[in-house]
Image (cartoon, coloured by chain):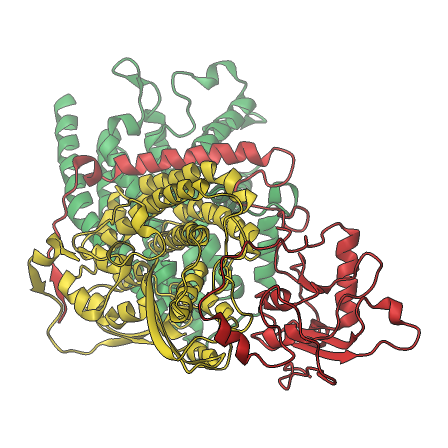
């Protein structure tokens, strides 16, 4: 097989995989929230209600597509697309497994090992906000524009702590490539702790996680779509599949963010203390590393759901205060300390 | 009425003073956070509320006018539709007003049953209010923990008088049914589950910094201002004024039970929330004591006064108020001696509270407006009548 | 401008750092999560605290529930209703229409009383299920049953006629969901104002609870002027 064919297969696979997880996530969200709230959740469509996302999709597709009369048509259509696409694209640099040997050919389980993968992730996550702002503005509704404005402010102020948290990782591992970072996280330090970003950078991890929640617009940071205040915020005027794209894009975003969390802070596909490559064949090793990655990712996906149904929502100014007055100074201090330690130890 | 610390706390004037171009944001009557059909027309400067004009009347059904065309016992179901979260309190308030007009006192057993049912209704009402407050601030889960307990309470209502929401409990002159077996079976367990649900809500919300930030100091209100506006009930007590009709002007057998009146300090959303949470606890205590008193009475103790089929109170007028979950719920009835009241006027507690809405939210943020509205527990059915 | 009391926010360290309390909250939701996961795999209705799987599992409805009306028959299968119209008078929503009639020749044994209702209609679109008709009925003929699924495709179908009301009763009887006869209410001594009240009652109405019922005059068919919206 030619290289481009392999790449194509990888791209198709990873898109399909991300889509599948996102679809299942909508079901998990509803069922898990129900279980936390002493309810049952959707359990009629298919076994355990697993076909519920399909039913929802059919419903959204067949609904009437309404564009408000005074909306900016082109932007109105563009909004959801801009929101959903970057989330998919982020997945391109995520190393979702080590490598697999098929027919004597070694295939890296990553769509492309960009050496500035980091910056790519940051840049794309910032683009998603355009989808919200444009959608909010084009709808020509006050609630929508308020939601869009909130989204902008929130995204801008949480990009910074996120960047600061990520910089510490860059300092630690000395590379921008996600694959390199994962490779460096294998093994242990101090004798017993896995060589994970989480143990080396606990503060950075917390900052990153909080910023990731803000980035994904999840409770407690779901201000742009804050249901009780802004109806549903930036997508108030949307219906049919455009709304579906917004809702769905959120889950794809979650999938991407949890994948990045795993590769940066939790050693990616590698198991701690165990080197799977030693006792597994080349093909089964590839599959095993992929599964390990997925399991770690699944935990963070569940954490997103879990936290959402536990905590209340921030207020707009408190959100800003947390970002600028707590996370950024903390991130800066953390960055300096890390830089100092890195300087001293090397 | 005793003055609490809230009255002495320093009050400062807040809010924006500059005049500028503001956005008019129309919230409601169709909006997820407007309970029922409320409408608030706000002027906002960014996220800050410059002015908020509540508009009422979307649920006006002319209940008071209806009362003039219905007989005394026919009006009872209408009172269900005032504060539908605690219909029993409305029923009892109306029944007691008519009984006062007739100059009769219902038998002690009926009084105790009324008390127990009213306190159950109070718990149900507070559970809904606290739950909805959580929902509006983004915490959906406590709502479900509380609503399960409300379901149990509704089951008792159903087995006592046959309806869950629009209870129409009892009749003028007493209650028509003894406490159901369900109550005897369930109460010892329910007492604990109600408390457990409250504890769970408490552990999810009260000490959570996000919740505290969202509620502490939000819409803080001075006690004397609250008195001027005519606040009653939990709203007034949250401002630090210890006023509870159950204590101050005891009716039924509230003077025979021992309970505390929880008060807040600042009248902010947190205090209102805490007052409601603590009141649920007190209600459980009241039910326990009332149930103990009830058990002392013989099984065949009378439940009703002997009433004529058609009630014709003597000419005159009466005002009777009870402490409903939202505050002082009063019925003014003027009788001309016929079988229909000449005039009925209802004093709903949330009407007085909702008047002050603009003062409450001025200078706060839109999110606080929503939090404020939920914590007021404005029920459109009671507000618009 | 509103005056605002100054509120000092005094947080403990645990509250200040967010994470401790959030972790406690997470623990609580996790407990519920595990409990309900286990419960949802159990067989039987209502395993999870909130949910009833509605069409299959139903709540137990109280026997005294105020649902759809029914016109009761006695043990011999005779109609109890005598068409006195007390229910129509007591109804606050004015949704009951009753006409009194004489049973036709040879059909006297179908009715328990000397008279019967020739028309008995309840407009369920107006009904508020207060139970006043039930309380007013001297013969315990009309009662509110346990049915609560009252949706119809046509507004006209929501006006229950006599046939429908009796079939409601027969259905409930077959399912063993009849309303228990009302228990006697222990009554206290008569009120002070009783005399005045009784004097003024019109002929044809009851004097007092539990007292003898005055015989009705001729042609006291009660017909409500106010009819249902869709007639």
Q: Position of residue C28 (x, y in %)?
A: 38, 35
- Chain in green in the render: A
- Quarter of image, res B21: bottom left
Left of A192 or right of it: where is A92?
Answer: right
Q: Nearer the viewer, residue B365 or B161?
A: B161
Q: Where is residue C92 in the image (x, y as percent from the top left)?
A: 56, 74
Q: Where is residue C207 in the image (x, y as percent from the top left)?
A: 59, 72
Q: Which of C154 and A221 is in front in this view?
A: C154
Left of C170 or right of it: where is A239?
Answer: left
Q: Where is residue A109 in the image (x, y as percent from the top left)?
A: 47, 33
- Chain in red in the render: C
- Quarter of image, res A177: top left
Q: Nearer the viewer, residue C182 or B124?
A: C182
The structure residue drawn at horizontal position 29% and vertical position 50%, both measured from the top left corner, is B255
Q: Is residue B318 visible?
A: yes
| Colour chosen for chain B | yellow
């Amino acid at each position: 097989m030619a290289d481009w064919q392999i790449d194509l297969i990888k791209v198709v696979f990873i898109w399909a995989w991300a889509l599948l997880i996102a679809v299942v996530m909508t079901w998990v969200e509803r069922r898990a929230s129900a279980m936390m709230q002493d309810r049952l959740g959707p359990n009629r469509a298919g076994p355990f209600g697993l076909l519920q996302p399909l039913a929802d999709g059919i419903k959204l597709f067949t609904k009437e597509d309404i564009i408000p009369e005074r909306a900016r048509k082109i932007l109105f259509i563009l909004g959801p697309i801009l929101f959903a696409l970057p989330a998919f694209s982020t997945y391109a640099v995520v190393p979702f497994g080590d490598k697999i040997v098929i027919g004597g050919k070694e295939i890296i389980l990553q769509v492309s090992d960009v050496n500035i993968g980091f910056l790519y992730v940051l840049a794309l996550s910032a683009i998603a906000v355009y989808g919200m702002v444009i959608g909010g503005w084009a709808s020509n509704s006050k609630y929508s524009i308020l939601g869009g404005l909130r989204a902008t402010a929130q995204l801008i102020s949480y990009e910074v702590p996120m960047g600061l948290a990520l910089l510490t990782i860059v300092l630690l591992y000395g590379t921008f490539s996600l694959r390199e970072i994962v490779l460096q996280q294998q093994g242990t330090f101090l004798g017993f702790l896995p060589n994970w970003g989480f143990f080396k950078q606990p503060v950075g991890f917390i900052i990153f996680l909080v910023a990731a929640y803000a980035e994904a617009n999840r409770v407690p940071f779901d201000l742009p779509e804050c249901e009780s205040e802004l109806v549903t915020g930036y997508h108030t005027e949307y219906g049919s599949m455009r709304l579906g794209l917004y809702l769905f894009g959120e889950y794809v975003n979650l999938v991407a963010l949890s994948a990045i969390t795993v590769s940066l802070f939790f050693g990616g596909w590698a198991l701690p203390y165990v080197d799977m490559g030693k006792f597994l064949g080349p093909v089964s090793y590839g599959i095993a590393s992929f599964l390990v990655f997925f399991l770690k990712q699944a935990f963070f996906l569940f954490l997103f759901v879990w936290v959402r149904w536990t905590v209340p929502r921030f207020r707009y100014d408190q959100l800003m205060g947390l970002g600028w007055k707590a996370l950024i100074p903390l991130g800066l201090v953390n960055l300096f300390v890390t830089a100092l330690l890195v300087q001293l130890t090397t | 009425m005793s003055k609490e610390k809230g009255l002495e706390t320093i009050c400062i004037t807040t809010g924006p003073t500059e005049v500028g171009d503001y956005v008019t944001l129309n919230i409601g009557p169709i909006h997820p956070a407007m309970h029922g059909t409320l409408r608030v027309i706000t002027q906002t400067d960014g996220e800050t509320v410059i002015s908020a004009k509540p508009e009422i009347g979307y649920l006006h059904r002319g209940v008071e006018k209806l009362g003039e065309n219905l007989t005394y016992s026919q009006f009872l179901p209408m009172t269900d539709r005032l504060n539908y979260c605690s219909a029993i309190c409305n029923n009892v308030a109306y029944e007691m007003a008519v009984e006062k007009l007739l100059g009769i006192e219902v038998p002690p057993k009926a009084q105790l049953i009324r008390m127990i049912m009213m306190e159950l209704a109070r718990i149900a009402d507070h559970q809904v209010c606290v739950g909805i407050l959580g929902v509006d601030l983004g915490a959906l889960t406590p709502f479900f923990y509380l609503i399960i307990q409300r379901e149990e309470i509704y089951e008792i209502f159903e087995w006592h008088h046959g309806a869950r929401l629009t209870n129409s409990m009892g009749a003028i002159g007493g209650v028509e049914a003894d406490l159901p077996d369900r109550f005897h079976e369930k109460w010892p367990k329910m007492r604990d589950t109600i408390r457990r649900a409250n504890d769970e809500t408490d552990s999810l919300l009260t000490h959570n910094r996000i919740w505290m930030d969202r509620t502490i100091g939000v819409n803080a209100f001075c006690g004397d201002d609250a008195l001027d506006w005519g606040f009653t009930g939990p709203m007034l007590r949250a401002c630090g004024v210890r006023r509870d009709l159950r204590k101050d002007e005891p009716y039924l057998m509230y003077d025979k039970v021992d309970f505390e009146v929880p008060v807040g300090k600042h009248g902010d959303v947190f205090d209102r929330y805490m007052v409601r949470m603590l009141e649920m606890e007190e209600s459980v205590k009241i039910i326990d004591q009332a149930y103990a008193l009830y058990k002392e009475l013989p099984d065949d103790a009378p439940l009703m006064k002997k009433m004529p089929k058609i009630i014709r109170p003597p000419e005159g007028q009466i005002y009777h108020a009870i402490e409903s979950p939202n505050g002082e719920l009063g019925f003014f009835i003027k009788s001309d001696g016929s079988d229909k009241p000449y005039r009925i006027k209802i004093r709903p507690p949330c009407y007085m509270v909702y008047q002050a809405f603009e003062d409450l939210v001025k200078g706060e943020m839109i999110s606080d407006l929503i939090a404020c509205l939920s914590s007021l527990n404005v029920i459109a059915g009671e507000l618009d009548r | 401008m509103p005056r605002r009391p100054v509120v000092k926010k005094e947080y403990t360290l645990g509250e200040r750092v967010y994470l401790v309390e959030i972790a406690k909250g997470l623990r609580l939701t996790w407990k519920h999560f595990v409990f309900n996961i286990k419960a949802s795999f159990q067989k039987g209705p209502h395993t999870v605290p909130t949910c009833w799987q509605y069409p299959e599992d139903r709540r137990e409805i109280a026997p005294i529930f105020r649902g759809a009306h029914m016109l009761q028959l006695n043990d011999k299968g005779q109609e109890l209703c005598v068409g006195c119209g007390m229910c129509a008078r007591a109804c606050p929503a004015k949704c009951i229409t009753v006409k009194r009639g004489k049973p036709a020749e040879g059909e006297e044994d179908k009715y328990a009383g000397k008279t019967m209702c020739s028309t008995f209609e309840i407009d369920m679109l107006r009904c508020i299920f207060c139970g006043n008709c039930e309380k007013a009925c001297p013969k315990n003929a009309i009662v509110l049953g346990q049915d609560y699924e009252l949706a119809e495709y046509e507004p006209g179908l929501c006006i229950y006629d006599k046939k429908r009301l009796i079939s409601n009763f027969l259905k409930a009887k077959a399912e063993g969901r009849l309303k228990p006869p009302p228990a006697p209410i222990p009554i206290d001594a008569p009120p002070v104002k009783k005399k005045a009240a009784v004097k003024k009652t019109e002929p044809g109405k009851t004097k007092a609870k539990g007292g003898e019922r005055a015989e009705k005059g001729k042609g006291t068919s009660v017909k409500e002027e106010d009819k249902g919206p869709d007639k």
